[in-house]
């Protein structure tokens, strides 16, 4: 019999912030709303009768806006009817893809640390996770680590850039190392690009644009981070028609189709709120620097972060070498909630045990 499911670290730490009144630099959600033009579009949609099921693939206006976005930003051409699927956040896109593709016993390679839903859904599918360890302070994807994790037994390689929790933006060389392994072992890349617009140094490169990768890549993103609507849970998967059909096949029995008025507003966000996303990234870059300076002044060693809204800090100069213990004391003694990086690893590895993740998507 299956054991009791664990409560996620985000739920636990947000509850701790609420019960202690501490500032929540744990769970990654902004404490300010996204653009008014998008909120107005949602209200208009609610008031003009867009309140029943959306079509299973998502409303045409949103699928077309996603296709325009991918074309404008990355030169990727998508057929909005067959190559785009709207989902309940990136989370459902990732879950549908993994449940569709992974058979019991199949291996799934993923960066380690990684966002916590990946390993959970691989377990639901009966897959076997294969970590690709990243090591601080650079968190680089190393060819040897990829070679050790990816083989002919691998069905899916999960990519995430910009990367939660480290804030790394993978460069072209690292993406090519991953792409090479996919081509060599006939592996499908499932890439989580929810932070694609939250980049402070470098550029976002979708792995689908690397050599011969389009035909074997499912790209996932959502409106949550880019436009500060994490509670709307409007996401999408895109890629070749047969892979998108596989995602759709599972998604139809998870939730079918929902969030109709928010899908209308998400189309407006993608088409009209590009400048707001740029402003958000500029303001987050300042908040990153503010938080990094503060943590440095407090005695932490702060690691570089180039994207997402997270940074990691090493408290060993302050005499702490166990982030779990530190994160239990921080709310009470310093009025701040943070997340131990070990929550994102397959095993509590020594290389991450001391490290703490702080979110900087909060008011100054
Ligand atoms: N992937 C990553 C890497 C994330 O940090 C998050 C944050 N919640 C998600 C996926 C989930 O995205 P969504 O809220 O659109 O489901
Ligand atoms: N993605 C957010 C984070 O990493 C939180 C998501 C969640 O609460 N499940 O903090």
Image (tube, rainbow, N blue to C red):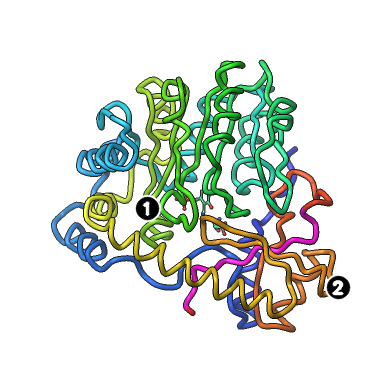
Residue 75 x/y as whole percent: 31, 34
Q: Which mark is residue 319?
A: 2
Residue 310 x/y as whole percent: 57, 61
Residue 204 vs 165, above or below: the answer is above
Q: Which mark is residue 223?
A: 1
| Label 2 residue SS | loop
Foreground residue among 193 and 21: 193
- Is 219 on the left or on the right of 154, as rendered? left
| Label 1 residue SS | helix
Query: What separation in Å lies between label 2 and label 1 (alpha carbons)?
Result: 40 Å
Residue 207 x/y as whole percent: 48, 33
Q: Residue at x 25, y 32 (%)?
A: 80
Quarter of the image with the N terminus in it: top right
Foreground residue among 83 and 178: 178
Foreground residue among 26 and 175: 175
Q: Residues within 10 Å of mark 1 (few under 14, many from 20)?
A: many
| Corner quadrant of residue 65 | top left
Q: Residue at x 75, y 45 (%)?
A: 3
Residue 143 vs 293, above or below: the answer is above
Q: Residue 357 in magenta?
A: yes
Front: mark 2 or 1: 2
**Magenta extent:** 352-363
- Total of numbered circles in the picture? 2
Q: Is mark 1 within 8 Å of ligand 1?
A: yes
Q: Residues within 10 Å of mark 2 (few under 14, many from 20)?
A: few
Q: Residue at x 50, y 72 (%)?
A: 287
Q: Residue at x 47, y 77 (%)?
A: 363
Residue 161 vs 273, above or below: the answer is above
């Amino acid at each position: 019999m299956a054991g009791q499911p664990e409560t996620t670290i985000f739920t636990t730490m947000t509850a701790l912030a609420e019960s202690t009144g501490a500032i929540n630099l744990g769970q990654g959600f902004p404490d300010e709303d996204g653009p008014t033009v998008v909120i107005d579009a949602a209200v208009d949609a609610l008031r003009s009768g867009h309140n029943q099921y959306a079509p299973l693939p998502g409303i045409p206006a949103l699928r077309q806006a996603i296709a325009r976005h991918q074309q404008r930003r990355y030169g990727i051409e998508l057929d909005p009817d067959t190559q785009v699927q709207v989902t309940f956040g990136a989370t459902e896109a990732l879950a549908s893809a993994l449940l569709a593709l992974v058979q019991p016993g199949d291996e799934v390679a993923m960066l380690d640390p990684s966002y916590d839903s990946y390993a959970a859904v691989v377990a639901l599918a009966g897959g076997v996770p294969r970590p690709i360890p990243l090591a601080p302070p650079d968190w680089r994807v190393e060819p040897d680590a990829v070679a050790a994790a990816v083989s002919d037994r691998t069905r899916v390689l999960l990519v995430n850039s910009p990367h939660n929790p480290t804030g790394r933006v993978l460069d072209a060389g690292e993406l090519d190392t991953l792409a090479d392994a996919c081509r060599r072992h006939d592996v499908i890349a499932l890439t989580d690009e929810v932070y694609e617009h939250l980049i402070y140094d470098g550029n976002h490169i979708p792995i689908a644009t690397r050599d011969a990768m389009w035909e074997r890549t499912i790209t996932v993103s959502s409106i949550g981070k880019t436009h500060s609507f994490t509670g709307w849970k409007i996401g999408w998967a895109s890629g070749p028609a047969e892979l998108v059909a596989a995602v759709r096949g599972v998604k139809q029995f998870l939730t079918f189709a929902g969030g109709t008025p928010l899908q209308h507003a998400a189309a407006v966000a993608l088409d009209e709120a590009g400048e707001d996303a740029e402003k958000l990234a500029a303001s987050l870059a300042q908040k990153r620097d503010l938080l990094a300076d503060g943590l440095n002044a407090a005695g932490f060693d702060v690691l570089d972060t180039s994207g997402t809204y997270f940074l990691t800090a090493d408290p060993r100069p302050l005499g702490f070498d166990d982030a779990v213990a530190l994160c239990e004391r921080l709310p009470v003694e310093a009025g701040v909630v943070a997340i131990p990086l070990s929550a994102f690893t397959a095993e509590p590895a020594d290389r991450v045990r001391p490290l703490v993740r702080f979110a900087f998507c909060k008011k100054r």
